[in-house]
Image (tube, rainbow, N blue to C red):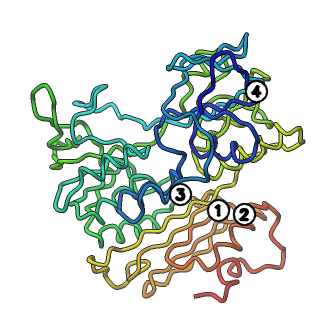
Amino acid sequence: MRTQSGNTARVVVIGAGMAGARLAARVPGVTVIGEEEHAPYNRVLLAEVLAGRYEPDVIALPPAEVRRGVRVVRIDRADRLVHCDDGSVIGYERLVLATGSNPVLPPLRGLGHMLPDGVHPFRTLDDCLALRAAVRPGVRAVVIGGGLLGVSAARALAECGAQVVLAQQGEHLMERQLDAESAGLLRRHLESLGVEVHTECRVRGLRCTDGATPAVRAVELADGYELEAEITVLACGVRPRTGLAQAAGLDVRKGVLVDDELRTSDPYIHAVGDCAEHRGTVYGLAGAALEQADVLAEVLAGGSARYEGTRALTRLTLRSPASVPVAAGVAGAPGGLDLAAFGDSRPMPGDDVIRLADATRGAYRTVVVRGDRLAGGVLFGDLAAVGTLARTWQDDEPLPADMSLLHLLTNDGGF
């Protein structure tokens, strides 16, 4: 669909990611502008595409009319116009910023504005396809970053037959979601797939070939050690894309500031997804983006919906390739690993912690109770209780006074 200069749309959405596509599916007649040439897709499943489990068409979202390959260069708030890089100008009654986030490029020696050959971010479908084209059995790959994205990328590269090293600056993997014990189980699982894991490991720079087109050859650590690398994946987190909002004079901190109606400092402009900051929080999670889009759809339809924040559950499934034998006692063996984390799994003074572990089955469960409420938890290998625990946490209701805390982990019949 091409919107001609001078036309006015009731609702214009900048960004065709998961939040923008969800809004288009909920609100009739929306004009969606997306920079990527691809149709909207489920970003959560990019690691499955990298591993070769899915082809790109499998992760496509329900069809939506999107102006693909078009970048918005300026927002004219006074006349309510959006200016695009193809020369078109679109008027709006309401504008929605769903611009998402950019991968963080760490300040490494040898990493400039132009990435050396072999260095890949891992954020978009194009990133994923470029990385998949570069991977071959035996290639040496270093993943920088041990969060959810880095862990997923390392597993996928191992499935492709690469020799993978995962370098994490923090004390353990997935520090935002996991406690030390569950992170240790995750590490054992990755190592069983052939991934070499380094924690408390600070990367200093990249060693690249000389010439007009430099190519990465090694990742240099702060202690002077070098990790040989033909491929380097940057999985160091994301940063909200707020450039358009800032240039338009909207209020921005970490993200574009929004109220409970997802409205920015301009009453005719809203923001949802990774670019939005609500009550001091930028979620950066697919679940929050979809929930915000659903609330905004009701607001745009004249409803009284309000967004009060998202209590998000993180789930991760790592399947073991058939060609890789998984050692007994490793979580999820032999089929792989299932993990779920929610809330704050790191106890504070005065919290109650309930933990059950079964080394034989590779199962681990822990929950943190703060006062009379469930503060968070981690389930690893056996997720039978995750539904009940997640609902209890999401409802944020006081736990029954006569409930045994152990019952929180065994109300499905236990191990």
Residue sitting nearer the eye, 235 or 18: 18
Instruction: Indicate the secondary structure of the residue bearing disc 2.
Output: helix
The span from disc 2 to disc 4 (Cα, nearest Å) is: 35 Å
Q: Is residue 410 left or right of residue 210?
A: right
Residue on which the image places disc 1: 376
Residue on which the image places disc 2: 393
Residue on which the image places disc 3: 177
Q: Residue sitting at 14 percent across and 42 percent down? A: 217
Q: Amino acid at mark 1?
A: Gly
Give the quarter of the image for residue 16. top right
Instruction: Indicate the secondary structure of the residue bearing disc 4.
Output: strand
Instruction: Give the image location of residue 302, x and y in percent.
Output: 89, 38
Q: Earlier in the sequence, mark 4 or mark 3?
A: 4
Instruction: Indicate the secondary structure of the residue bearing disc 1.
Output: strand
Residue on which the image places disc 4: 94
Q: Earlier in the sequence, mark 2 or mark 1?
A: 1
The span from disc 1 to disc 4 (Cα, nearest Å) is: 38 Å
Q: In which quadrant of the rendered image does the N terminus lie?
A: top right
The crowd level at tag 4 (other Cα within 10 Å; few <14, some 14-19, many 20+) is some
Residue sitting nearer the eye, 148 or 226: 148
Q: Residue sitting at 78 percent across and 24 percent down? A: 93
